[in-house]
Image: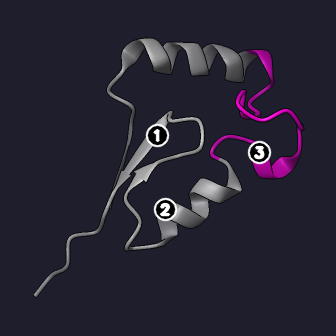
Amino acid sequence: MAVRLNENKELVAKIQEGLKKRDGYCPCRLPKIEEYKCICDEFRKQIADPDFEGYCHCKLYYKSRDEKQG
């Protein structure tokens, strides 16, 4: 499994600026609740799923799927 930042540096900078302004809470969601603190609960669950491949809600992070051994 690999989790990386989005390759779009401009988007990453914009999201990181939003995170800074919102004290680490996802700038793409209005409520400031613990589930939306970056890395949000939704993406943590997606990271744990070996079959998931894709971006987090705000597109800051990308998770590639686990390669099956054997």
Q: What SS does tag 3 mark? A: helix
Q: Quarter-wise, where is residue 6 in the image?
A: top left
Q: Position of residue 14 (x, y in %)?
A: 56, 13
Q: What SS does tag 1 mark? A: strand
Q: Residues within 10 Å of mark 1 (few under 14, many from 20)?
A: some
Q: Which residue is disc 1 drawn over?
A: 61
Q: Residue furthest bottom?
A: 70
Read off the magenta span: 21-39
Q: Position of residue 51 (x, y in %)?
A: 37, 73
The quadrant of the image that shows the N terminus is bottom left
| In this rendering, position of residue 49 left or right of residue 16 | left
Which sits earlier in the primary sequence, circle 3 or circle 1? 3
* Residue 14 against residue 32 in the figure, above or below: above
Number of numbered discs: 3
Which sits earlier in the primary sequence, circle 2 or circle 1? 2
Q: Which amino acid type is marked by label 3? A: Tyr
The magenta stretch spans residue 33: yes
Q: Which residue is disc 3 drawn over?
A: 36
Colour option used: one colour
The magenta stretch spans residue 46: no
Q: Which residue is disc 2 drawn over?
A: 47
Q: Separation of disc 2 and disc 1 at Cα?
A: 10 Å
Q: What SS does tag 2 mark? A: helix
Residue name at image x 40 percent, y 52 percent: 54
Q: Separation of disc 2 and disc 3 at Cα?
A: 15 Å
Which sits earlier in the primary sequence, circle 2 or circle 3? 3
* Residue 25 against residue 18 in the figure, above or below: below
Q: Which amino acid type is marked by label 1? A: Tyr
Q: Position of residue 37 (x, y in %)?
A: 75, 42
Residue name at image x 72 percent, y 34 percent: 26
Q: Are marks 2 and 3 in contact (CB under 8 Å)?
A: no
